[in-house]
Image (spheres, rainbow, N blue to C red):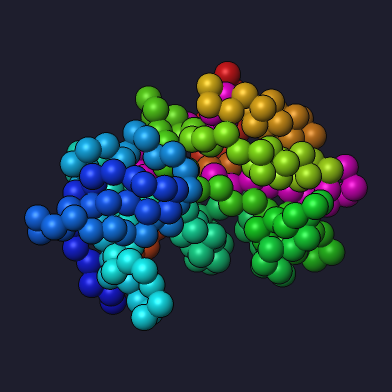
Amino acid sequence: MAEKIWGKFIERPNRFSLWVEINGKRELAHLPNPGRLSEILTPRRRILLRKAKGAKRKTRWTAIGADLSGMLVSLDSTLPNRFLPQALREGAVPPLKGWRIAAREPRLGVGRSDFLLVRGNRRLFLEVKSVTLVEGGVALFPDAPTVRGRRHLLELAEVVRHGASAMVLFVVQRPDANRFGPNAATDPAFAEAFGEALEGGVEMYALVCSFDGERLHPRRFLGPEALVLS
């Protein structure tokens, strides 16, 4: 297990780097999350750092978590995709019971989806979205405008029209959400595509998780009854 240490957030020079204070010294750390994270990355916020592996790394540390009043929030937007196979094995996503992963990053429109699942002769294209923004108990995605995210929704609706199934699973990397939905205030185009995809048969769910500094742990599954559409 890699060494971990707490630091304090100073500033963010670019999307994938943070300046942090570690034991009174200023150090640059890698941030594996391109989102804005503006509600999390505030001055002096305690940041959990993991010692980087590999001699070619430009930074000695990777920022993996943030302390929000005693609640640890994961800062790694790639963690939900790595966590998905475990979630399937544990039955944490009830609508995916009986489905198995057939391919990772299958072709989808002009780009790729995250997973292709199969059950018998049925196919399901699955997009996994990392969520760290929660307001008033509502997990919101995205926290910054995303043209790519909007395109994914429209492409998933297209595969449904051609007979396959499609799903978006919003993995909330903090345990304080009870509802979820598109962040229309930040990205109205994404919210519009969200509604179109939903009407077109794309399933939308959220999996709320806690984070222990290493792994995500499912806390609650949110279905259509928890969906908030503005």
Q: Is 158 contained in the magenta span?
A: no
Of 142 and 198, which appears nearest the observer?
142
Farthest-out residue, right = 162
Residue 69 spot, x, y in % from top left: 20, 39
Residue at (74%, 48%) from the top-left corner? 166
- Residue 227, quarter of picture: top right
Left or right: where does residue 132 sit relative to residue 20? right
Residue 208 seen anywhere in this rendered image of the structure: no
Residue at (53%, 21%) from the top-left corner? 185
Residue at (38%, 72%) from the top-left corner? 57
Of 144 and 15, which appears nearest the observer?
15
Farthest-out residue, top = 230
- Residue 148, quarter of picture: top right
Residue 41 spot, x, y in % from top left: 31, 40
Residue at (48%, 35%) from the top-left corner? 143
Residue 140 spot, x, y in % from top left: 49, 33
Residue 33 seen anywhere in this rendered image of the structure: yes
Farthest-out residue, bottom = 55
Q: Is 180 contained in the magenta span?
A: yes
- Residue 88, quarter of picture: bottom right
Left or right: where does residue 3 sit relative to residue 34? left
Position of 53 relative to 45 (above/below): below
- State which region is magenta: 159-184
